Image (cartoon, rainbow, N blue to C red):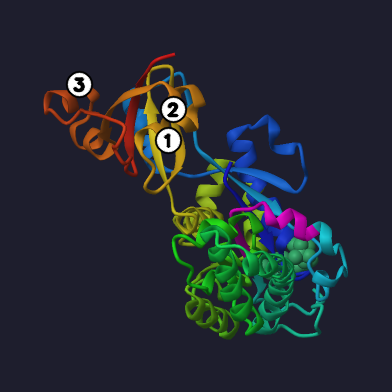
């Protein structure tokens, strides 16, 4: 599953937000494996299109798609040198697809701040510096090896790897994250196995108090400016309120949201932002037995999309019957979609679109 690592200094609200996320969504999805690791939460991706398809198809079961959140505790100043949980935390974060960086933007004298005052930009710098130092260490070690090899070899792979490492090393020594470094198409795959943390897309979460939720405050504005300068996004949420919302049953929750003038919980906005950040889209399979949402990366072709269901589907892929759920909503039934000639038969090169409803034909 695609997963997102949650980082931030101690006491910024990581556990609060992580628990709220997993409390709501784990119950909703009833996933038996969501409790295997207390730091990993499987969260369903809210999607109103799934509900609409369900209303029309009336299946026996409904399965939403999911995204995984990993609470990466123990990141403090000096982590890259082994302070706090140090190396253990670094190992956990290397395997994630994206980073959610929670920043404290609320004042509360009851909640101690590790640096003595609320200063989100300073906090962001502490975390990003640790991540950068950890990556730089990885890059320097590989650079030395590659340098030796490149001296005696004419292999273009070795040359390309060496040049990629040189670019990364230079930028990172100047304080830039790996994702800001422009690598060529030849270079990119050669450094992928370094699993650089600062290569991952990052979403900032400004954790505010209730009063600042609608309009933001000086802290959130600072975070937004910083994120914009890095090409990252910011989601504003109130962790303590989300924690309360997550304890309500669905009916109470809707009443509460309506009373706050909110359409959806902040956590849903967060999940959607993470989905966008990862460049993900959803396609559906819709039968009377089951309507189900599946996650793929933008640009995935039909066989790859089939492979998310089962590797046999990808190997034996023949064709996919396809139409978009918007056609279904407009016309009201699959029969009507067929009659309008909107059900297409697509081959191996078809690039699946967001909201497609697919039926795979395959050899076993
Ligand atoms: P972590 O160390 O980053 O995991 O932080 P926690 O989630 O344990 O939160 C630290 C403290 O801040 C706890 O006492 C929370 O109740 C409190 N807290 C979390 N979110 C908010 C918030 O949005 N507003 C306020 N006032 N307190 C919060």
Please identify the residue farthest to the left as the structure is shown. Answer: 340
Q: Nearer the viewer, mark 1 or mark 3?
A: 1
Looking at the image, which residue is at 71% across and 51% down?
A: 19
Disc 2 element: helix
* Some atom of ligand 1 lies within 8 Å of the CB belonging to the residue at label 3: no
SS under mark 1: helix
Q: Contact, CB < 8 Å: mark 1 with mark 2? A: yes
Residue 314 bears which disc, if any? 2
Q: Quick one: quadrant of the N terminus?
A: top right
User: Closest to the observer: 222 or 48?
Assistant: 222
Left or right of 145 in this view: 46:
left
Q: Which mark is residue 304?
A: 1
The alpha-carbon separation of the residues under discs 3 and 2 comes to 27 Å
Q: Earlier in the sequence, mark 3 or mark 2?
A: 2
Give the distance between the C-alpha atoms of the residues marked 1 and 2, in whole angstroms.
6 Å
Residue carrying label 3: 335
Which numbered dot is residue 36? none
């Amino acid at each position: 599953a695609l997963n997102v690592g949650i980082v931030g200094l101690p006491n910024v609200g990581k556990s609060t937000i992580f628990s709220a996320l997993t409390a709501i969504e784990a119950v909703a999805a009833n996933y038996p494996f969501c409790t295997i690791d207390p730091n990993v939460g499987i969260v369903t991706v809210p999607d109103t299109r799934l509900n609409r398809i369900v209303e029309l198809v009336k299946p026996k079961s409904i399965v939403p798609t999911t995204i995984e959140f990993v609470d990466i505790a123990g990141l403090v100043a000096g982590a890259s040198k082994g302070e706090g949980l140090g190396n253990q935390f670094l190992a956990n974060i290397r395997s994630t697809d994206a980073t959610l960086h929670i920043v404290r933007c609320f004042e509360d004298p009851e909640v101690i701040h590790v640096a003595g005052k609320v200063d989100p930009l300073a906090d962001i710098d502490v975390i990003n510096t640790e991540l950068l130092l950890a990556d730089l260490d990885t890059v320097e070690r590989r650079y030395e090896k590659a340098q030796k090899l490149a001296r005696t070899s004419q292999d273009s792979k070795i040359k390309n790897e060496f040049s990629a490492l040189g670019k990364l090393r230079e930028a990172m020594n100047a304080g830039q994250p790996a994702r800001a470094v422009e690598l060529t198409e030849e270079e990119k795959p050669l450094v992928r196995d370094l699993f650089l943390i600062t290569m991952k897309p990052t979403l900032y979460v400004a954790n505010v108090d209730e009063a600042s939720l609608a309009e933001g405050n000086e802290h959130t504005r600072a975070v937004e400016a910083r994120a914009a300068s890095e090409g990252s996004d910011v989601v504003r949420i109130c962790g303590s309120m989300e924690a309360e919302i997550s304890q309500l049953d669905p009916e109470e929750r809707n009443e509460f949201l309506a009373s706050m003038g909110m359409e959806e919980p902040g956590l849903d906005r967060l999940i959607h932002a993470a989905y966008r950040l990862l460049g993900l889209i959803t396609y559906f399979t819709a039968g009377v037995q089951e309507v189900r949402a599946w996650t793929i990366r933008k640009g995935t072709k039909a066989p790859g999309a089939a492979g998310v269901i089962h590797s046999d589907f990808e190997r034996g892929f023949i064709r996919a019957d396809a139409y978009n759920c918007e056609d279904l909503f407009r016309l009201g039934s699959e029969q009507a979609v067929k009659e309008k000639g909107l059900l297409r038969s697509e081959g191996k090169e078809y690039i699946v679109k967001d909201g497609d409803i697919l039926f795979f034909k395959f050899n076993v």
